[in-house]
Image: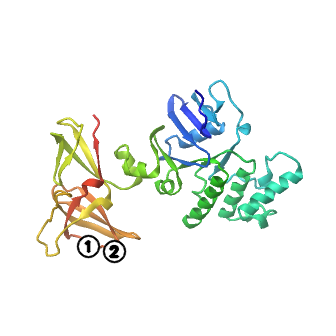
């Protein structure tokens, strides 16, 4: 049965090898019109290779690529890159240095001179670069070059835009503004966007959906809220933030720790688990007269640690503790300014509702 509403872009089971090394391993995803999907992961995990296969500049060893439900590439049939109606934006902008801004935007456009001129003027006006139509790329700032690169990528009216960390060369303040403007234009035109990034904060800010990649595979895919609050494994948690991890053994569906017991349904007796908590959910809990811990039922047992370092990092403070019971280091963040003296003893508890428990493999 044919899908009446196929995704704008769909890839199925893509595999790519280099010298017997699998760099993209059975990757599948869908991107709908007007949707921004971030392919997120560390350097070398296969993100850019996946983009190059979709663009047609690399050939997959197996798998299929579809646009609007139509096959554009498998291991036998292949639509050439220039006929895929896919736009590309890269970190280096890839502008032609010998061409003026207007000619850069017009490059690759079909039609008569008048029609191309109108399209160039329309796009430069949309990105606020009309007055630079006769300038050369070297006369522009990085942000201005990025706007020209966007206009050029949009010129042929692509139905899909592939973006390989195109904003990473810009400073933070400029990057946020240009990135948001760019994605607003693409959404207005109902373009499906697949953007590669290694920055979790960027993906959380801009994506409708995140595909988290590791070692050539997509390990989790979903809305940013779900990826962050229901991570697939310990590594997924640590990719988005610092973590504290406690290893414990299970007995009677409970993990025993110095912080109290944690429910571990489905884990056999004798199995080990990692209890993972982000620094913002490690609560500093002590009474001001120094009489010791004040545990609550919901937060388990309070455990003492000694401050080894505290620093203010903008809108919160990060406090590192050396734990009394085993000498391990745990980190807690506190809103605003909280800078206890090094050597001060404080009590810590773990929010049961905000920790993650993962079975330890092997």
Few, some or many residues within 10 Å of mark 1 (<14, 14–19, 20+): some
Relative to 187, residue 341 above or below: below
Few, some or many residues within 10 Å of mark 2 (<14, 14–19, 20+): some
Camera-side mark, 2 or 1: 2
Q: Position of residue 290 (x, y in %)?
A: 13, 73
Kindly indicate the quadrant of the structure image that contains residue 233.
top left
18 displayed left or right of 67: left
Kindly indicate the quadrant of the structure image that contains residue 347.
bottom left
82 displayed left or right of 295: right
Q: Position of residue 153 (x, y in %)?
A: 71, 50
Q: Residue at x 88, y 48 (%)?
A: 112
Q: Residue at x 73, y 37 (%)?
A: 83
Residue 48 seen from this side = yes
Relative to 19, residue 131 above or below: below
Kindly indicate the quadrant of the structure image that contains residue 136.
bottom right
Q: Which residue is mark 1?
A: 340
Q: Nearer the viewer, residue 326 or 156?
A: 156
Residue with the most extreme top position: 76
Q: Which residue is mark 2?
A: 337
Task: Give the quadrant of the N terminus.
Answer: top right
Relative to 233, residue 19 above or below: above
Q: Nearer the viewer, residue 201 or 340?
A: 201
Under tag 2, what secondary structure? loop
Q: Residue at x 26, y 45 (%)?
A: 274
Q: Nearer the viewer, residue 352 or 82?
A: 352
Task: Give the quadrant of the C terminus.
Answer: top left
Say the numbered circle drawn on residue 123: none
Under tag 1, what secondary structure? loop
Q: Position of residue 155 (x, y in %)?
A: 75, 51
Q: Nearer the viewer, residue 179 or 167?
A: 179
Cα separation between marks 2 and 1: 10 Å
């Amino acid at each position: 049965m044919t899908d009446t509403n196929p995704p704008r872009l769909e890839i199925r089971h893509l595999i790519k090898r280099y010298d017997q090394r699998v760099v993209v391993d059975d990757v599948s995803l869908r991107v709908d019109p007007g949707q921004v999907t971030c392919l997120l992961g560390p350097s070398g995990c296969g993100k850019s290779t996946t983009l190059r296969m979709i663009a047609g500049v690399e050939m997959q060893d197996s798998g299929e690529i579809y646009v609007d439900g139509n096959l554009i590439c498998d291991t036998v049939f292949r639509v050439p890159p220039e006929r895929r109606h896919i736009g590309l934006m890269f970190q280096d902008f890839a502008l032609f240095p010998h061409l003026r801004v207007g000619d850069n935007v017009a490059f690759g456009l079909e039609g008569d001179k008048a029609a191309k001129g109108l399209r160039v003027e329309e796009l430069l006006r949309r990105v606020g670069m009309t007055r630079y139509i006769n300038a050369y790329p070297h006369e522009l700032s990085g942000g201005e070059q990025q706007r020209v690169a966007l206009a050029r990528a949009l010129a042929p009216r692509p139905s899909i835009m592939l973006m390989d960390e195109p904003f990473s060369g810009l400073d933070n303040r400029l990057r946020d503004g240009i990135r948001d403007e760019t994605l607003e234009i693409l959404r207005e035109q109902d373009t499906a966007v697949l953007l590669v990034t290694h920055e979790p904060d960027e993906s959380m800010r801009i994506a409708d959906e995140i595909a988290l990649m590791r070692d050539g595979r997509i390990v989790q895919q979903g809305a940013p809220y779900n990826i962050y609050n229901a991570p697939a494994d310990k590594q997924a948690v640590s990719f988005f933030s610092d973590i504290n991890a406690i290893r414990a053994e299970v007995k009677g569906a409970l993990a025993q720790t110095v912080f109290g017991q944690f429910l571990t349904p489905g884990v056999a007796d004798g199995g080990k688990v990692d209890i993972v908590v982000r620094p913002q959910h490690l609560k500093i809990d002590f009474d001001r007269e120094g009489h010791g811990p004040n545990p609550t039922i919901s937060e388990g047992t309070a455990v003492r640690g000694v401050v080894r370092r505290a620093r203010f990092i903008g809108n919160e403070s990060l406090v590192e503790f050396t734990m009394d019971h085993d000498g391990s280091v745990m980190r807690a963040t506190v809103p605003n300014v909280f800078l206890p003296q090094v050597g001060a003893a404080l009590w810590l508890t773990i929010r049961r509702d905000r920790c993650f428990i993962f079975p330890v493999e092997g």
